[in-house]
Image (cartoon, rainbow, N blue to C red):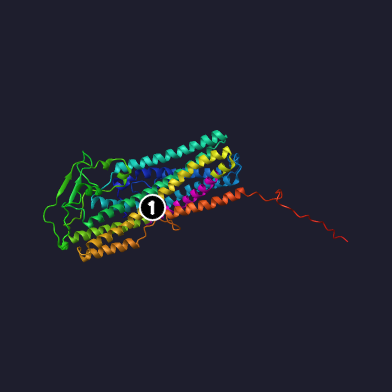
Amino acid sequence: MSNDNAKPTDSTFCQIMKPIYYMSKVAGLWPQSFLRKSPGVTVLDIAYLLILYFMCFFCILVNTNAKLWDYYMKPFESDILRYGLQTHLLNGLNLSVLISTINVIQYKRKWEYMELLDNITKVVEQEFHVRYPVRVVQMFITIIICAEFLYLMLILFGYYYLIDRTLNITTTYLYASYYIMNVSLLALLNEYTYFTVHIRRLFMIVNRLLKQLLLTDTNRIETVLLDQNRKSKTPTIAYDEIFTIYGRGGRKELDVNAGAGKRNGPSKVTVVAPASAGFNKLSTSTVYTTYITQLKIDQHSSMDTILKTINRLSVLHYHLCDAIRLVNRISSLSLMFHFGAMFVFLVFGLFTFYKAFNSGSWAFRIMAMANGAWIAFYIVGILTVITATTAAQNSGRLTGDIVHQIIRKHQNHFSVDVIEKLSTLSLQVKMRDMSFSCGLFNFDWNLFSSILSALAMYLVFLIQFDVTPPVGLSSPNLTIPSIELIDFTV
């Protein structure tokens, strides 16, 4: 898959990727251009990345100044809160530099992933007649990115209003540091999430194509078309709509000797009135729905056709597992570090809530309100990643269940070669690793439960350190025994 003359911008996958690409480009996480050039990095890309490095290092030097943080935390008088927030901010800035460097080093792997997903998308579009609502998905992703930036700016302005205006603390460098740190985090989360969502979408296509082998919902037709809009000349139908339009009545049972089945005449094409307005409708269901314009398997398909289809779907599933492996190598390490930085902030952010309720200080209440917005921001990011990875893994595992349904239903009808190939596909699904992992843990719901339990434990530790009175010479509970001076002189 090393075609240097290919132009991925002409493919559906890269057209949908454009909003993600531009955001990652702004954050310094995507060093390549869409056109495949050698080495794929321009002089302007390097200059822009150097500017980002300079901004990050400048913010790091500023935030290492102890006097500046003494000025920030003067109204709070809490060393625990001061060191926690400073550590979180410095970790985030260092991670911005780190993940940008990792992306520059791994740009070949990212291109390998892009070409792999591009080729898989072309296969399902050309061979299995799948269509994507490209403009709808682009608009959906763009709206999400704009909403994220709007929320980020609202939090920063909230910091300005609550801290700068109320507590009379100038926090200009704090705003800039948080902005640089969280823009790179947003770009990483969006990039990783969309990579995962597209893999899940392709798994869903493989599953829906495999469901054709159940031969329970095809009704004397071989090609089903549905107009995607009133001006379109190439109508399409969503796979789920086939069953609702034609129903299950009048279905003929599969003949026992289907292995030698042949087509008895020309294929039928049934055109239905325009009803698939959802193809161009801006909604989450449209983004996740797979539109298949033509079915390849029906009751009259020969065993050779079925065998070839299974072979092709098996290869697609195999390459999708490779795509998961590439995603783990490209972004999982950076995501693991960011999860750690977010965990640190969640601990000290919740500690701020404790101080706000315990001390009753207005300053702590203001800080708790500001940190509450960041806590919601980070929790949504963690839940988004975990939901996407879990859904993609479940879709990949679902292939094995569909294969076993086909075997149980048609083991006496299909030929030995078809049943053997289905069994091999089942073993392939079982043996391939589909987990999204960083090497230390998987990005799944077990991770989220571990984060919650660790948050409770470390929060208890911080509260204990805060309520325990200092033990020193000035403590009233400390008694010092009297020491008598003994004169040893003779």
Q: Residue sitting at 27 percent across and 42 percent down?
A: 278
Q: Is residue 15 visible?
A: no
Locate the N terminus by quadrant: bottom left
Q: Which residue is mark 1?
A: 389
Mark 1 falls on what kind of element? Answer: helix
Displayed quadrant of residue 133: top left
Instruction: Tell me: 171 left or right of 280.
Output: right
Q: Give the amino acid type for the residue marked by disc 1 in the picture.
A: Thr
Residue situated in front as seen by the camera: 107 or 257: 257
Q: Residue furthest top?
A: 165
Residue situated in front as seen by the camera: 118 or 205: 205
Q: Is residue 136 visible?
A: yes
Q: Where is residue 426 shown, x and y percent of the image?
A: 30, 62
Q: Residue sitting at 48 percent across and 48 percent down?
A: 342
Q: Look at the picture and state if 474 lies above or below 315.
A: above
Q: Where is residue 71 shown, x and y percent of the image?
A: 60, 39
Residue situated in front as seen by the camera: 360 or 350: 360
Q: Residue furthest left?
A: 265
Residue 315 falls within the magenta-colored stretch: no
Q: Residue sitting at 60 percent across and 39 percent down?
A: 75
Instruction: Tell me: 221 left or right of 387.
Output: left
Q: Look at the picture and state if 135 lies above or below 433.
A: above
Locate the C terminus by quadrant: bottom right
Q: Where is residue 73 shown, x and y percent of the image?
A: 59, 41
Residue situated in front as seen by the camera: 379 or 22: 379
- Region of the chain picked out in magenta, as a range: 325-352
